[in-house]
Image (spheres, rainbow, N blue to C red):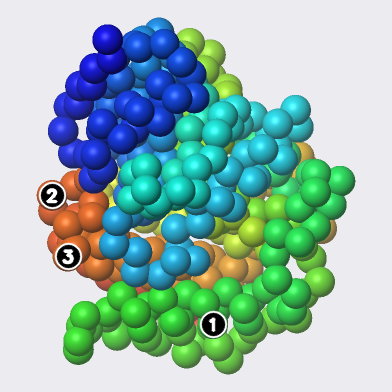
Amino acid sequence: MSGQASEGGLDFDLRRLDAYLRNWLGGGAATRVARTSGGMSNPTYFVTYGDWRAVLRKQPNSVLMPSAHAIDREYRVLTALQGSSVPTPKPYRYCEDREVLGTPFYLMEWLNGRAIYDYALPGLGREERAACYRSMGATLAAIHTLDYKELGLGDFGRPGNYFARQLNRWSRLWSEYRQGDEDNPALDRMVRWLGDRVPDSETLALCHGDFRMANVIFHPTEPRVIGVLDWELSTLGHPLVDLAFNTQAWRMAPDENGGLLGMLLGDTGIPSEQDYLDRYYEDSGAVERLTVFHQVFAMFRGAVGSAGVAARGDLGNNVLPDAANIGRRLARAYATRGMAMIENER
């Protein structure tokens, strides 16, 4: 006899998932589902079916921009990366039939490890913090040095100037997300500043798009990355934008996505921003170096992404009840930090 149990926060009919799992896996085990604290864009759930465990990722029910919830792209890149030097959970099954959960979804391996959302790595010792940062940076370098064509991802990004394409896309998203005459003048100024400075570049690599502490899983007892999650924004692009997004922590405050700005890093084991960058350059063999443009571009994307969190919060599509306010606050914080870098360059 099958059954279902939920800890709340579901945006789909659990009976339909239960039927899907019974049809696929057989037997009559009990299905249990709990929503995770992550998945601010694409809702994410822990699923158990008897002794079988998985993680489920789906589109939100109210999609603001279909291209911003690319569940199929996530599944494709996870499949391509199996057996590569980049650790990822194993993808199990993709379902595009909206009759099941109302949106496309996929199931993947449930990794036994530590999810840490704070760049300060609270509770860890000095050596373990240092090793976690080394592993995170080495993992990002491994992503950027993959032969994406050999992995079958040669068509994973559109042709043309990556920076121009992304600036156009995220500017359109900002136009979609802003509510009426919603005011974020710093973000509007960043759009203009970036538009006047789009560089020519032929550098292409597989890019994660949202590579940060919260999107990696560490081994349960060892200071090493065992899985990279949330590939929703992955594409073929410029690796220094990925790097700039990853190093935002050194330029954001602790209440701004767990940043490090204003903290005394000293004896904590957390490297300086420059030390972290230097190790990445060594691991990746990168010739180009991070510039203010890349950093401002990453802040711009962080601001627009946070505005998207706010817009989804207004629709009731987020795991946090105060998502709308949190998203708007972070959108302003990212934009303010980006404009500060622009002003400091003058």
Q: CA distance from mark 2 to mark 3?
A: 10 Å
Along the polypeptide, which appears first: circle 2 or circle 1? 1
How far across and down, in percent of the image, does residue 341 sit? 46, 72
Q: Identify which residue, 18 or 86, lies in the foreground.
A: 18
- Image height of 171 relative to 103, above or below: below
Secondary structure at numbered mark 1: helix
Using residue 277 as the reference point, say whether residue 8 is left or right of it.
left
Q: Which residue is mark 1?
A: 168
Q: CA distance from mark 1 to mark 3?
A: 24 Å
In front: label 1 or label 3: 3
Q: Which residue is mark 3?
A: 314
- Regarding residue 306, the answer to whether it shows in the image is yes
Secondary structure at numbered mark 2: loop
- Image height of 261 relative to 141, above or below: below
Q: CA distance from mark 2 to mark 1?
A: 31 Å
Using residue 184 as the reference point, say whether residue 314 is left or right of it.
left
Residues at badges 2 and 3 in contact (C-beta under 8 Å)? Answer: no
Three-letter code for the amino acid on which mark 1 is drawn: Asn
How far across and down, in percent of the image, does residue 117 sit? 36, 36
How far across and down, in percent of the image, does residue 179 sit? 21, 80
How many neighbours does mark 1 have within 10 angstroms: few (below 14), some (14-19), or many (20 or more)?
few
